[in-house]
Image (cartoon, rainbow, N blue to C red):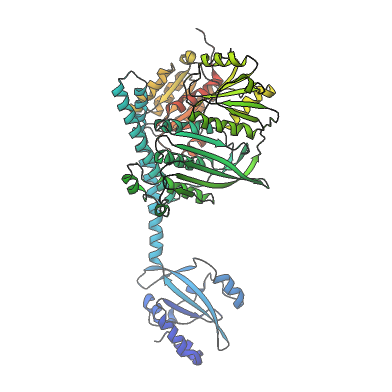
Amino acid sequence: MDPLLHVKQTFPKHASLIEAFASLHKGIMVLLDKDERIIGSNRALLDFLGVETLDIIDNTIFCGGLDLIDTSKEHWAQHHLKQDGLSIGLQNSANEKSSFGVMIDVAEVEGERLYMLLLEDNSNIQKAIRAHHYFEIFKRKFLTSISHEFRTPMNGILGFIKLLENSVLSKTQRHQVLMIDESATDMMRKIENLLEMMQLDSGAITLKETVYKPMTGMDEFFLKFYESARKKNITLFCRVDVNIPNSMVGDPGKIKRILESLISNAIKFTNEGGQILVELKVLEVKDGFVEVEYSVLDSGEGIPHKRLAHILRPFASAQENQKLGKNGLGIGLSVSHKYLAMMHSKLSVASEVGKGSKFFFRLTHKINEPAQPARFENAKIAVASFSALDHQYAKCVASYLEDFGVSVMQTTFIDKEELEAVDALFIISEDLKDERIVSVRKILGDGITIVSILTKQRKSVSISSVHNVIETLEFPMLPNKIENVLSHIYLNHALTQKREQVDTRTNKQFKILLAEDNRINLELLQTILSLQNYDVTAVEHGEAALEAYMKEPYDLVLTDIDMPVMDGIVATRLMREVDKKEHRGKVPVIALTAYALEGDRERIMNAGLDAHIPKPVDKPYLLEVIKHFLKRQQKPDTK
């Protein structure tokens, strides 16, 4: 039976047109009258359902839920034609189910309204969507697992390398250990870049904007690049605008991650003796928002124009890097580009072969607390430097001083007559000793205040205060450091308080409970803590940690998360119950874990732990965190 017989009889003038259209549509076509009854279809519907006539088809299989009744043509079209993903399911005589995407149109034929349903089988699409969803779940589990499995052994490798570096070694052995350290660190960085890119592609990483203070931790952030730059005899300058808000809204983790990639690349592609400038510059402040430009400018090799077009593609630079004798998979810039896209920005680059490159991006932040830099309009300061390299550092310091309204004079020698009118002398030097200060005092007298600024990091500063040296500063130089010194000189304000540090002589009075199931990592952490004179109790899983915790109180707990018998999160919750029952107060619990992907920190912190330190563990950072939590519980020295 012709499935279009009824409609052709009803509309004889348009019978041939309707039949032609039905034959052209490869999928299923169904015609409904104004009362939503099926009046015709093409042969595809009968073939799918396995029937010979439309008479036995229930009219509701198409119309149910489509809400076609009592709607004008215009309203109906607006309601249905603009919907995405409208679909229905059909089952044939063999009980096989298929999902169909539906496109609906309305037409006036010989004075009658007809609804036309065009169906396309999208069962394969639905299967693909389900398969994709399953794959994404599998990929996230894989990422979590592979990250954990890499970080755990790398923690032992990098940790013991650091211990070896501080031991007695021959010159050859020390060089070999440094090469191992460099190779292991480079491998870890590549692994992290690959995992990060996979997370981005899977949608596991999201933008996490929060109110933060942009200057907090920036000196430590910049400092970690100074050593690698110094190894290549590269001068690294970091310049932060004094008008950066005290606090603003953004995702500081991702911003630092982008800068880290750009600075690392700049060091890699800048030859010995070159220079790099990292700058955070305020472009505009308006209506409670600030636009900041973040840039990294280097005097490196530069990038050929033909490479700029594909430099942001992952792995695109890997082969070119190999030709240049450089390491790298070319992932860092691609990850940075994707992060900036999440923040509605983009990574820009300007480069000239043989002269260097500038990578920069601009972000608009909501201001939470505006900048309030002090002004020292009547201040007069001289900045002295005595070598070509120190002159560059002096320019950086002078620029900062001018931002605070200081009248600055740069000099290359100490002359009493020339410096008679200044209030203070800033001396730039790689290694300034008391003898030099005494010599300067003989020329200038005791009336001038001296500030020494060291261009090279030192573990201890030997300069005494007896020669009226009020402060010894080190690069990287940030505006808050300069402002503190100026306040001390002119406003008699106290300098920013130094971080309180736990005296290692009393560390033995602090009891630390350590839970770690990996034997190598357990020994590493025990060694690190023992060298700091902490009293350490080490156990291999959470249940043993809980048993030890119930027997005696501890000042701090370090725990792995993924452990046999009882994991770190469950152990922490039970320890909290012990604290309440025995009125111990809240003992800090710090997670040392290979769970370091996006969201892991939040999950662990929400479970009640006080801090999250990812593996491989950074020894200085670990000790700093421990000191931070112990300083509130510092016990008096009873020696």
Residue placed furthest toward the left: 172
Q: Is residue 604 visible?
A: yes
Question: Residue placed at 48% from the left, 17% from the top?
Answer: 510
Determine whether, in the image, residue 414 is placed left or right of residue 490.
left
Measured from the top left, where is residue 400 in percent x and y? 60, 33
* Residue 246 x/y as whole percent: 63, 36
75 lies left or right of 621: right
| Figure quadrant of residue 409 | top right
**In the rendered image, the vertical position of residue 1 relative to residue 505, given as above or below:** below
Residue sitting nearer the eye, 332 or 557 = 332
Instruction: Choose between 612 and 560: the one closer to the eye.
Output: 612
Name of the residue lying farthest toward the top:
639
Extreme residue toward the right, this view: 378
Counting every numbered tag in the picture gives 0
The residue nearer to you, when weighing 444 against 59, is: 444
The residue positioned 53% from the left and 33% from the top of the image is 218
Residue 225: x %, y % from top left: 45, 33
Q: Quadrant of residue 372?
A: top right
Which image quadrant: the N terminus? bottom left
Position above or below: 353 against 154: below
Is residue 71 something that shows in the picture?
no
Q: Position of residue 95 (x, y in %)?
A: 37, 69
Nearer to us in this view, 620 or 458: 458
- Vertical side of 375 occupied by 103: above or below: below
Residue 425: image quadrant is top right
Q: Say if 455 sits above or below 275 in the image.
A: above
